[in-house]
Amino acid sequence: MIRFALVCANGHEFESWFASNESYDFQIANKLVSCPYCNGTGIAKAVMAPAVARAVGASAKPAAAPKQNVALLGEADGGLRDMARELHQKIVAATVDVGTEFAREARRIHDGEAPERPIRGQTSPEEARALLDEGVEIMPMPASPEDLG
């Protein structure tokens, strides 16, 4: 998975994840990506600072926690919050939680070594990228609004 900083034609900045550069190009060309603020489909990559490796040592600062995508919804948008909560609940109800064994179990299912079934769990971004590269069709699980607190 690759995270891109994006900007719409109206100047709204946001981030999104893509399986590859080719996936980004295809989705942008086919107007499958829209701005979360204005729903515009005129999207381009924003200027991003390169990742710089830092020396590990006593003076090195700990890495900041990864940021989450969030939305500010007014009272009139309560239906969107309810939809997010409902989607999260449906995924939880329809899947088996395999916890931190997600990557291993997803590979076993993909390779036919374990029975096919919907699962959920936790894995690192690097492991998620590796699964996608191997052809394992995974997706980020949407957070319930209550999970952000």
Image: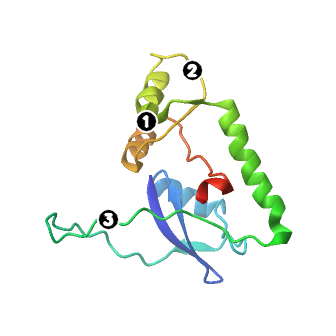
Horizontal and vertical percent for residue 124? 40, 46
Viewer-side label of 1, 2:
1
Residue 29, visible in the rendered structure? yes
Mark toward the start of the polypeptide (1 vs 2): 1
Q: Look at 81% across and 67% down and name the residue there.
A: 77
Viewer-side label of 2, 3:
3
Horizontal and vertical percent for residue 15? 53, 67
Q: Look at 41% across and 35% down and name the residue there.
A: 134
To which residue does mark 3 refer?
63
Q: Is residue 58 left or right of residue 147?
A: left
Q: Residues within 10 Å of mark 2 (few under 14, many from 20)?
A: few
Horizontal and vertical percent for residue 80? 78, 60
Q: Is residue 48 left or right of residue 93?
A: left
Q: Which one is nearer the viewer's eye here, 69 or 113?
A: 69
Q: Look at 48% across and 34% down and name the residue there.
A: 99
User: Is 76 placed above or below 134 here?
Assistant: below
Q: CA distance from mark 3 to mark 1?
A: 21 Å
User: Is 14 placed above or below 91 here?
Assistant: below
Residue 135, visible in the rendered structure? no
Q: Residues within 10 Å of mark 1 (few under 14, many from 20)?
A: few
- Amino acid of disc 3: Ala
To which residue does mark 2 refer?
116
Horizontal and vertical percent for residue 25? 52, 60
Image quarter for residue 70? bottom right
- For residue 100, the mark is 1
- Amino acid of disc 2: Glu
Mark toward the start of the polypeptide (2 vs 3): 3
Residue sticking out furthest to the bottom: 11
Q: Which one is nearer the viewer's eye here, 23 or 113?
A: 113
Secondary structure at badge 2 equals loop
Q: CA distance from mark 1 to mark 2?
A: 18 Å
